[in-house]
Image (cartoon, coloured by chain):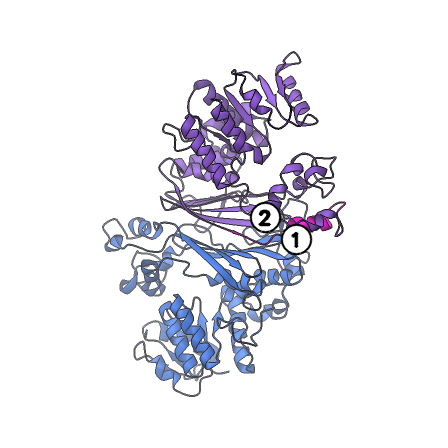
Chain colours: A blue, B purple
């Protein structure tokens, strides 16, 4: 496995960052080609002919066009969360994948979170009985990600777009122009795996409802270096502060997803996995299993380092084997697994483990 | 205030229980008239002419016909949870109330739960900012309420209907024949008060989704004195084990309700009250308020007996005044408040505080 090229129009920040990472991994002698002549220069990179796979970690609006271009060039793309931004982009990914027979790997790292994989293992072993209801979401106070002062990455101001840097430069625009669950896969990915979504099971109906939009405007008015007279106080945000979605599957499960990124709150992906024998809730590390737990009473899932905890007993085999390798990687180690899964699939020529193009025959479930 | 009559066709259990309660409250000399000649004998009671109000604590299917009969007789009914069972019954209550100008008092005791009223007080004082998203529900493992052995009230067998006693005799049938949120007001009542529902605000859309039905059949097969060959193992239950509902209001809030009564789980009414400044969650006694809580971190709402807890600081004036009177009453004291509220309204001739017939002018919000 070798990194041969990088592409990014942002020569001020993104390219130097990539250089640093490559130097750290390969040493100072390593040279990689750089495609930095504007936002379309990545197309020239795809023409090189020596590329098997591309990791797409660009602003959201680039995910689908770049993934489609990769597939058309015979290259397998891995796409950061969240991939497609509308229904047409979903079809673009599926149609191109079916036409080219190249899968799209969704880099949904939460599928590999240590506790989530232990819960997957519990589900596979039947601890919850027959699964019935699942919840997930993205509940994360992103106000100082969506706004900064143009100097620091997080917060310090209420700027976004051209006057901001990093994610606030592009991500916040999605809150101005779109209303819906902008980031569904942190929740849907892991619970989808548990109920074999698109491996025999399928989503059949979905209802999304949004609250009014208040949080981002309030932050501009009250936030650091903001105010009622700040030019951004006139911006009308379309994104409702909390978006709730209810989904039904062919197998009769229900899924509830939450998107909640504009308000003060503790971080929570809102997981709940419930079946005929009991349930797990992410919040406050809670589990209840009939026959094991005292009736009507929560237990703690506990720390995987405590031998008699649920999380130790049901540690997923992948984590049991690779916890040391993953140690120190991003987001509590789960980024190691998602990258590793992608690279291994490419090296071995096997189908990627969790893909958008799940209609392709032969793809395998993360078990 | 005086109890003059009781009506119930169940002369074996209900009438003796009522007699005991009356004796305990008034002494042995107190005599009340008894209407026990079949399920329609209550109509004769309503003709007495000396009754101002009736408390309806009968099986659900009687709530609406009895409330309607009360109003037509010029008597104000108080109805136990849950009142109407379908849309036609909702209209029957509203139309009769509007025609007779008599309100229907919904005995939704959770509106008066001590922590819930403290949270109402927090909401009124602006602690959460502008309210955006509210959750509630009825998540209660009722399997040993829905089934018993015909001798004890709770559990011991998998009988329901005629072979069972108490609630299992009638309540379980609603799980056989109906699919939906059978018990929405424990959740909707309290959060509805917080967002002035039907006092300027209004529900505008609702989507309900149910999982498949598994829990009750499983209990019959695996439960006490049950089995695969038990006659009830052939019963097909319509009620999905978990029913989730998403509601939008005219003021732009969203409400999520859960109904979950067929599965092993800890009791939880699933409350969440969230606004632009923070949120409260019933589960694990959790609160986060911007400017008070550490960023991204939960605090405990605490015990009202701890002076510096949120629940002490925001104790609702009604609880501050009447906690001693309510002490020892049903369901942690809240039953005292709901009965008291009804009786006081009748005595004073003022509108009842939380009614179905909320379109009547002059009704007052629980503040």
For the view shown, which residue lies furthest in the top direction?
B29
Dot 2: chain letter: B
Asked if both marks, 1 and 2, belong to the same chain, the answer given is no
The quarter holding residue A315 reads bottom right
| Residue with the mark numbered 1 | A277
In the displayed structure image, the side of residue B194 where residue A226 appears, left or right: left
Q: Position of residue B125 (x, y in %)?
A: 39, 35
Compared with A312, A340 (above or below) is below
Q: Nearer the viewer, residue B33 or B342?
A: B33
Q: Is residue A178 visible?
A: yes
Horizontal and vertical percent position of residue A327:
55, 67
Q: Residue furthest bottom?
A: A49
Q: Residues within 10 Å of mark 1 (few under 14, many from 20)?
A: many
Element carrying mark 2: loop
Q: Where residue A348 appears, x then y in whole percent?
A: 56, 82
Horizontal and vertical percent position of residue A319: 61, 67
Say whether residue A217 is left or right of residue B264: left
Q: What residue is drawn where x is 51% and y is 64%? A: A189
- Which range of residues does the magenta coloring cover? B208-227
Tag of residue B239: 2
Name the residue located 52 percent from the left edge and 80 percent from the top edge.
Answer: A346
| CA distance separating discs 1 and 2 | 18 Å
Left or right relative to A275: residue A93 = left
* Looking at the image, residue A248 lies above or below residue B195: below
- Image quadrant containing the C terminus of chain B: top left
* Pointer 2 local density, CA inside 10 Å: few below 14, some 14–19, many at least 20: many
Question: Which residue appears at 37% of the width and 27% of the height?
Answer: B362
Q: Chain of mark 1?
A: A
- A202 within the magenta span: no
Task: Tell us which disc is closer to us: 1 or 2.
Answer: 2
Question: Does residue B156 appear left or right of residue A47 in this picture?
Answer: right
Residue B225 lies in the magenta-colored region: yes
């Amino acid at each position: 496995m070798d990194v041969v090229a990088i592409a990014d129009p942002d020569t001020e920040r993104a390219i130097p960052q990539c250089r640093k990472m490559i130097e750290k991994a390969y040493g100072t002698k390593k040279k990689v080609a750089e495609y930095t002549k504007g936002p379309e220069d990545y197309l020239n990179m795809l023409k090189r002919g020596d590329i098997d796979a591309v990791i797409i970690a660009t602003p959201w609006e680039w995910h689908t066009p770049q993934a489609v271009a990769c597939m058309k060039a015979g290259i397998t793309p891995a796409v950061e969360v969240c991939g497609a931004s509308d229904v047409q982009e979903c079809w673009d990914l599926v149609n191109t994948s079916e036409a080219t027979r190249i899968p799209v790997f969704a880099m949904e790292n939460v599928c590999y979170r240590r506790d989530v994989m232990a819960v997957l293992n519990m589900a596979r072993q039947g601890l919850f009985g027959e699964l019935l209801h699942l919840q997930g979401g993205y509940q994360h106070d992103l106000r100082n990600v969506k706004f900064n002062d143009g100097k620091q990455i997080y917060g310090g101001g209420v700027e976004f777009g051209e006057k901001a840097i990093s994610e606030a430069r592009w991500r916040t625009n999605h809150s101005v122009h779109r209303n819906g669950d902008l980031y569904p896969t942190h929740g849907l990915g892991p619970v989808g795996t548990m109920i074999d979504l698109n491996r025999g099971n399928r989503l059949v109906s979905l209802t999304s409802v949004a609250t009014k939009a208040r949080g981002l405007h309030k932050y501009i008015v009250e936030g650091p270096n903001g105010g009622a007279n700040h030019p951004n106080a006139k911006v009308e945000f379309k994104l409702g502060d909390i978006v709730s979605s209810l989904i039904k599957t062919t197998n009769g499960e229900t899924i509830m997803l939450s998107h909640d990124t504009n308000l003060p709150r503790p971080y929570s992906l809102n997981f709940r996995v419930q079946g005929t024998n009991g349930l797990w809730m992410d919040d406050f590390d809670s589990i209840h299993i009939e026959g094991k737990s005292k009736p009507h009473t929560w237990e703690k899932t506990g720390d995987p380092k405590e031998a008699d905890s649920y999380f130790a007993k049901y540690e997923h085999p992948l984590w049991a084997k690779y916890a040391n390798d993953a140690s120190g990687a991003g987001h509590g180690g789960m980024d190691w697994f998602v990258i590793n899964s992608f690279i291994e699939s490419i090296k071995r020529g096997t189908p990627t483990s969790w893909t958008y193009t799940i209609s392709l025959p032969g793809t395998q479930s993360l078990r």
